[in-house]
Amino acid sequence: MCGRFNVIDDPLSKLVSDWLKIDFKPTESNSNVCPSQSVDCLIATSANNQSVTQIAQQAYPWGLRTDWSNKLLINARSETVAEKTTFRSGFSSKRCIIPISSWYEWKTDFSGNKTKYEFIPKDGALLMAGILVKQVNSYSNQGSFDLDQIAPDYYLVSLTTTANKQCQPIHSRMPLMINQDAAENWLYGDFEQAKRLLDGKMPVLDIKSY
């Protein structure tokens, strides 16, 4: 799973901008991005109603409120995201990328002590896969997380996959990452092109414990 991650402007902004040939700059650095907070994402958009698709930056709240849990729904499993009723529409037409600097997991030992681990890419940035989902349950008309603001049209849900050999000793799940060369196919490719990216390979990481 992924319940916290890290967005640090330098070198993240430059790397993502260079990789995708865009001007990406996070709203602010945040070393502990939590569910419900606004997250800068990359989405596909058509400028001035033109047929040419471009990559744009837009912020969305991370996590969806549901009728069946008192916790925000922040992650979707990559193995089932294309079929699940809650996620299928978002996967089909509202995929996004979340540029991050690292992410965190916690592991509890036999004595109940928790150790925090940070997973850090060697090149300074990761492109985490996500989808944008509309609120479709009884919370739909109850406003945003901040009741003084208009509720957003979409909420961010990040994708997870089975942990690779490097991460598996700490947690069985890990974020699904999109290779920079596959970013356009993820953002505005068709359904089948996107499905082929659901088994993305994770780059080698540095792992720190705290």
Image (cartoon, rainbow, N blue to C red):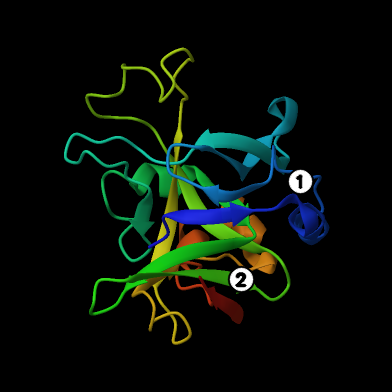
Is residue 75 positioned above or below 153 on the image?
below
Q: Is residue 189 visible?
A: no
Side (left or right) of 29 relative to 197: right
Residue 48 x/y as whole percent: 74, 25
Which quadrant of the figure has residue 124? bottom right
In depth, the one of 23 and 169 nearer the eye is 169
Tell me if I can see residue 123 in this picture: yes
Q: Which amino acid is tagged 1?
A: Phe
Percent coordinates x, y for residue 205 in the rendering? 60, 78
Left/right of residue 18 with respect to residue 42 in the rendered view: right
Residue 103 lies, in percent from the top left, at 53, 62
**In the image, what residue occupies the spot 38% across and 42% down?**
89
SS type, badge 2:
strand
Disc 1: which residue: 24
Mark 2 and mark 1 lie on one chain; the one further toward the N terminus is 1
| Residue 10 shown left or right of residue 161 in the figure | right
Extreme residue in the top direction = 148
Quarter holding the N terminus? Answer: bottom left
- The residue at which mark 2 appears reads as 120
Mark in front: 2 vs 1: 2
Q: Helix, strand, or loop for circle 1?
A: loop
